[in-house]
Image (cartoon, coloured by chain):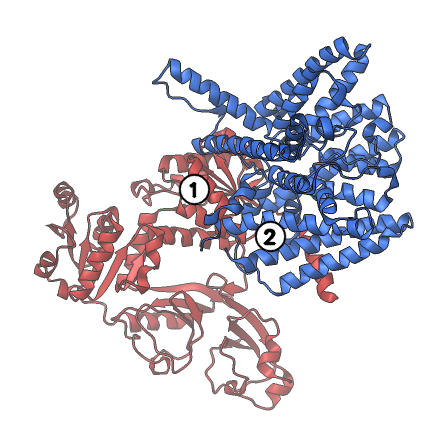
Chain colours: A blue, B red
Amino acid sequence: MRLKIVFNMLGKLLIFVGLSMFLPLLVALYYREMDAVSFLVSMGLTVSIGKIMQRFSFSQQEIRHREGFAIVTLGWILISIFGSIPFMLSGVFDNFIDAFFESVSGFTTTGATVIMSLESLSHSILFWRSLSHWLGGMGIIVMSIAILPELAGSMQLFKAEVPGPVHDRLRPRIKETAKTLWVIYLLLTVSQIILLFVNDVPLFEAVIHSFGTVSTGGFSSRTLSVRAYDSLIIDGIMVFFMFLAGTNFTLHYQVLRGNIKALFNNKEFRFYVFLVTTAIILITINLRLQVYKTIVESIRYAAFQTLSIISTAGFATVNYDIWPPFSRGILLVLMFIGGSAGSTAGGIKVIRIYALMKKGFQELYKLIHPRAVTSLKIGNRAVSEEVSTSILGFFFLYIIVFVVAAITLTSFGIDIVSSISAVAATLGNIGPGLGLIGPLKTYVPLPITGKLLLSFCMLLGRLEIYTVLVFMLSGFWRK
Amino acid sequence: MSSMVSKFKKIKDNLTSSPAYQAIIYGGNQIGLQLADQLTKLGRDVVIIDEDDRVLRQAQEKVDVMALAGSGVDIATLKQAGISKTKLMIAVSNNDEKNILTSIYANKLGVDEIVAKINDYHALNKSNSVFSENLGIDLIVNPCQIVVEQIKDLIRPTMKTEIESFVDGRVQLSEVMISHRSPFAFNHIAQIDLPPQTIIISLLRRNRLFIPHGEHKIYPGDTVYILGKKVFRAKLGQLLSKSQNNKEKIVLAGGSNINYQLAKVFKRNQAILSLIEEDEARCEELVEDLSDILILHGKPTNIDLLKEEGIDQADIFVAAGDKDEANLLSGLAAKKLGSKKVIAIVNSLEYSYFSEIVNVDTILSPQVLVLERILDFLHQGQVESESILNGQMRLVRVDVPKKFARKGMEIKDLNNSSDLIIGIVIRGKELIIPDGDLEFKEDDQLLIFTLSAKSDLQRDLFGNY
């Protein structure tokens, strides 16, 4: 570990985040809000600390694996800490833990909130919350790779931040790949803003909701979330974009380049579509029989909630906490699955679930034919032993972290369903869970340690566990 | 503030620039990786194709390239790699046939420049020009051939005349490699008895080019670049070839392809050849194929055998067996036992930097040579015409200021700088290759050879005139 290199990079990231505070500053100036001052102060503070960190370190050497992990993990923690400064300064929270929770929740695109009433917040704070989603969605480090020339070839950082078991390159160079990803991301966001705006959503709210959807975050500008609009068209637009945000961005790229066949040939996408439609159909039937009177209503709510959970956005148009247990059960399962690899969604990822299923069946098959030589294949591509082991390990760690965190939460006296869903919702970067933290409620009632634990879960989920956990191994620090 | 602005500009350029030049490398071996590294540094996008998944993953972490699992002879893979927008194809996998086939595909799919590595010596005989002409392969590199050429150069330093020519060919640059026996060796530059109107413009030592001065000494292994008018070429040749008539005793250790080719090359050149090979069957093969050579059956690392065959009399010892370690060891032994010049061949790239540690004269790595050959080829198109010696040296025309000339200044009065030398003075139709006492006249034009990339030479030379 060469800490100086790490600090240099962290300084760069801080300067970056500090500069991004310029946007909410503009918003504050436009709406003539007092919070402009707090953004100005936080911006100055963040940038100058970043500068100081850079001054006392150097960056000539190349980043190795260890430094890569350290930079990404520490970077995300630091960014979240500095991202919480505007919340503190503008008086949204009276304690740091809440501000930190909100900030982590923003950058990791979780969307879990500890703010009771969003209507009382200023525009600039709302905008900052959503902007943190948007920056965190594709990844701050991926963005830095695209923008900063110094980082041009750092596959280590890229790998540590981009979700998914294998990392496809869209273009021969990392920098170009990162750039392409951000362009696709920007395109999706802008088209959603336009669509929402055309359908009578005020521009500011259209921006907020698009940031929340494409990054699969889920922060809204209304306490009631998307339910406040109560419009079929807006629901439809949101569903469509949540679906897109949960799709692998490599596929977006290929479709944009005219290769539509790639969609149908991609096993993960097919499995994703299969999961989404099955979940919608099952929930619709369940809802039609037990809750709603019309089939249209059932489909509408079922579709929105299903996609909101599987894409890990976490918007809500209905209080699904009052739904029958079967529907809630399906939603809980979807929380674990999450979106596709290489998307902005969280969770275990569809491709891992698919690989795990295949691996499981393969073991069964081997019992019948003990001498069979098999190879795990997804589509036409064979998954190497190394990758499949890493998938198994990931799944195991995910479940272990989930169990430990959920049990710890119950020790604070929180009921089982709430604890389980809270951990699932933060680890999967979804946001709202069930019970105590249901779609219409917030994380306010949790104790401070609980909030810290869940903040940690969000980071674990966003950086896909390995990156953070490896950092805590003793061997990592050995020279 | 200005640093901020320049930083923003850099970021903007970085965001907008999109390198269009793509190269595909087939073969993720050491050569492939090194090439990829160099190419990305030159600002080209690189896609590496290889059959082995594991190699590729390592590649992707070391170098900023896209790695594709597959075969170069699979058109689907090539298309996936984006062959339609590829300008350069380098096939350096370990399989000759696949390299050739990949090159053919690349040619048919419209790649501009194609480089292929082919190990088989027989595929490349001069008569076999089918390759480059009909298959569209621009450069074929054969590791064995390159090594043999290199060794030949080391043993029999040759003069290459007219490697560059200037002023409509009236002045030429010649390259002379200095060996132990060369009349130039161990002399100061000032002592060398060059024909008049010639000048040593630069010296290449350990891959570093510099401009020598009178007090510099020339050592064996150096390469000297001499500038002279066309007519003096013959004289220079005579001067150099004075003492090249002795027979040399060459010991080749190992019956590898390289040594086999070397034996063939030197057969007629009246050298005393002996070859040591461990494997009896191979020995018999060699005896059948080669004549005028002593084939010894035994281990090249066997010191008794070496002594017995008079290794202390040997002028050149080439260790080119299959094992790198054995080559280094036998080379070391031969050197210790008194062989004058020892060349060891190593295949692995790691050993090629051992020359500092192991006391042999030259360590040659076919891999490095192949790499250099390919890089040279790639550089060719890039280097501007006004530069020579692979772009290391630049050529600048400078007018002599009138004021300066009127004062009757001589060359030695110029501000002396160690990284440039005045090669030619053009005075009307006359060409003068100058020495220090030449007096400038009006309207003189100077042709200057310089190592630096500085643009303001005029200022440097003439000060404030």
| Residue sitting farthest toward the bottom | B407
Q: Chain of mark 1?
A: B
Element carrying mark 1? loop
Q: Residue at x 55, y 37 (%)?
A: A167
The reply to the same-chain question for discs 2 and 1 is no
Q: Quickly name the residue at label 1.
A: B28
A32 vs A141, left or right, is right
Q: Nearer the viewer, mark 2 or mark 1?
A: 2
Q: Chain of mark 2?
A: A
Q: Quickly name the residue at label 2.
A: A151
Q: Give the CA distance from mark 2 to mark 1.
A: 24 Å
Element carrying mark 2? helix
Q: Residue at x 47, y 44 (%)?
A: B59
- The answer to whether residue A120 is visible is yes
| Residue sitting farthest toward the top | A289
Name which residue type carries label 2: Leu
Query: Closest to the observer: A259 or B208?
Result: A259
Name which residue type carries label 1: Gly
- The answer to whether residue B87 is visible is no
Residue B197 x/y as whole percent: 42, 78
Q: Quarter-wise, where is residue A405 in the image?
A: top right
Mark 2 neighbour density, 10 Å: few (under 14) some (14–19) many (20 or more): many
Rendered position, B146 above or below B123: below
